Amino acid sequence: MSSTVLITGAAGWLGGLLAAELINDPRTPDLRLILADIVEPNAPPLSKSICIKADLTDKAQLETLFSTEFGIPDTVYCLHGIMSRGAEDNFDLGVKINVDSVRLLLEATRSYCEASVKFIFTSSLAVYGGPLPDVVTTSTIATPQGSYGFGKLTSELFINEYSRRGWVDGRIVRLPTILVRPGAPSLASSSFISAIIREPLHGVETVCPIGDSINSPELSLKSWLASPETTIKNIVTAKHIPAEKFLPHTRVICLPGFTATVRDELEALFKVAGQDALNLVKFKDDPVNRRLVSSWPSAFDNSYALSLGFAVDEGGMEPIVQRFWDRVHAVDK
């Protein structure tokens, strides 16, 4: 039996990792990929793929994704969006991409696909804000303090409603901040969390927007984190969980993660790569960036997600930094 999977945002780093992971997923046999983004995605090697350049805010262009030679998808991964600082700086564009285009994709999925179609949406811990408990649980109310979180939460509500009505089988995964992300910095407010590891390990200077020096108390800022490897495995796992396993009132799952401070990151960088790497991190405090990131929760109860079969990183920050360092050296060789 073949499986046809549509991925929007497929030209992005996460979309590319997901496509490659699905190819190796034994529970997704005879995979056919429909890959779409605002720029034409690259097909994974040896894959059965159709790559489409499309403006996903345009209804006519979006609907072409459901009329390819591969036919109607049985799974839709909605990964596209504009990141946190980009949405904060341009509210109208953020709503157009993070809300309007997601609803268009939901409507097309409802119109063209069977009701059993799995609609998997990557959301964010940015949906939280304001006074929060020390540990966020499945019952913690989301009150975003930024436009990015507002957009993500709005789309979550649509997906929950479409699932309640039986129009799609929605799965909403709220991602921790992922590190270490390769490639160029993004418009995410959390982009620095990867940059202060990635750039120094490549021998490149970078700016930390939290605090004004290595001794700044602001470096105690905590974040909720996960590695790329664990995150991608969990996004694939979301496809395979039986619908009846979810809580009856919501399709939201906060993916497992761990808590670390900016200082924890810098200490791991020092342990893995030494003082020369640490010296490449410069400091210039950005109050807007710090406000957005500090409004997000830094500790979650992982028990519900783990009970569904999702995985969590073990060992904290240092093994993640070490794996990235090893990859950098492998490329250099």
Image (cartoon, helix red, strand yellow):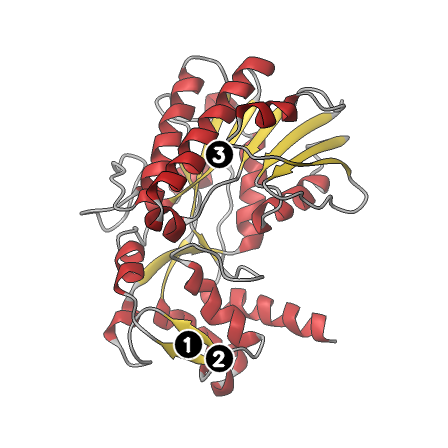
Residue under numbered circle 2: 271
Percent from the top left, x then y, of residue 93? 40, 41
Task: Say whether disc 1 or disc 3 marks the residue closer to the N-terminus.
Answer: 3
Q: Quadrant of residue 111?
A: top right
Image quarter of the C terminus = bottom right
**Position of 221 compared to 35: left or right?**
left
Q: Does residue 75 appear left or right of residue 149 in this picture?
A: right
Q: CA distance from mark 2 to mark 3?
A: 36 Å
Residue 121: numbered disc:
3
Callouts 1 and 2 close, C-beta under 8 Å: yes
**Residue position for label 1:** 267
Real-space Cα distance between discs 1 and 3? 34 Å
Residue 192 lies in quadrant = bottom left
Which residue is most to the left? 131
CA neighbours of label 2 inside 10 A, class few (<14), some (14 to 19), many (20+)? some
Seen in the picture, residue 168 relative to 322 is either above or below; the reply is above
- The residue lying toward the viewer, choosing from 191 and 223, is 191
Cβ atoms under marks 1 and 3 closer than 8 Å: no
Residue 333 visible (yes or no): yes
Specify the quadrant of the image occupied by residue 259: bottom left
Q: Position of residue 179 (x, y in %)?
A: 49, 59
What type is the residue that disc 2 sits on? Answer: Lys
Q: Position of residue 274 (x, y in %)?
A: 50, 84
- Specify the quadrant that holds the N terminus: top right
- Whole-angstrom CA distance, mark 1 to mark 2, is 6 Å
> Which secondary structure lies at badge 1?
helix
| Image position of 333 (left or right of 280) | right
Residue 114, visible in the rendered structure = no
Whether 330 is drawn above or below 179: the answer is below
Amino acid under disc 1: Glu
Q: Which mark is residue 94?
A: none
What type is the residue that disc 3 sits on? Phe
